[in-house]
Amino acid sequence: MELFDVDKYQLPKDMDIEWEITKKRFSVFLSEYKNIREKVGIPATPRIQETYSVMHRENISPEVLNDPLYKEFEYLHRLFIKGYLSINHPYKTEITDRRRKIFLLRYFYGLSISLVSERIHYQKNIILIDSKNSLIQFTSAIQLLEQKQE
């Protein structure tokens, strides 16, 4: 018996992913997450800061905290954070940080590869690779990733 089953934690290869389905599921999730943020009084996309954080630190009124919409926000926010924290590189924290920045800028803020490249000063091919890897990691963590059937 193995102590650690690698297959259980292995991410699929790029060519084994149903990209159209995965991106559609991700876009539905992200749309609803941004929507609920606004409904509870938090900006859909917070100001881009040097830390590229999406944590909600805004003052939320007590009546909003009891609103059923806020419960939905908390649920979606926990999913978002779970997906976001799953974006990583196993050995290099600087690559983990870069991937997370690229994920937020590309998908959360909707910036193009060229704009992300200008903003964080990396080549476009690095942005493209990290975008794809971060999307795979995020969607896999919150079970939005669809693999091709053999």
Image (spheres, helix red, strand yellow):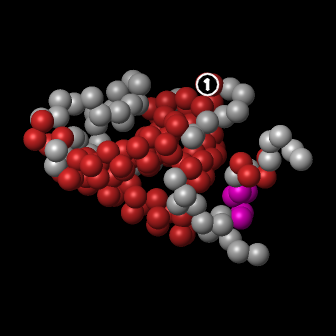
Image location of residue 126, percent across then percent down: 63, 40
Q: Quadrant of residue 28?
A: bottom left
Give the residue drawn at x 59%, y 54%.
140
Give the residue drawn at x 49%, y 30%.
120
The residue labelled by disc 1 is: 94
Report how many numbered discs are placed on residues in the image: 1
Q: Quadrant of residue 18?
A: bottom right
Other residues around mark 1 within 10 Å, as few (<14) / some (14–19) / many (≥20): few
Image location of residue 105, percent across then percent down: 43, 41
Q: Nearer the viewer, residue 115 or 46?
A: 46
Q: Nearer the viewer, residue 117 or 66?
A: 66
State the quadrant of the C terminus: bottom right
Q: Check if residue 11 falls in the magenta segment.
A: no
Q: Main secondary structure of the magenta part?
A: helix
Q: Could one spot residue 124 in this view of the protein? A: no
Q: Check if residue 15 falls in the magenta segment.
A: yes
Tell me which segment is drawn in magenta: 12-16
- Among all residues in the image, which is located at the extreme right? 1
Q: Could one spot residue 28 in this view of the protein? A: yes
Where is 73 relative to 54, above or below?
below
Q: Is residue 114 left or right of residue 6?
A: left
Where is 21 relative to 67, above or below?
below
Image location of residue 65, percent across then percent down: 18, 41
Question: Which amino acid type is marked by label 1?
Answer: Glu
Give the residue drawn at x 55%, y 29%.
97
- Among all residues in the image, which is located at the extreme bottom? 150
- Among all residues in the image, which is located at the extreme front? 1
Secondary structure category for the residue under label 1: helix
Q: Is residue 145 left or right of residue 3?
A: left
Image location of residue 33, percent across then percent down: 33, 52
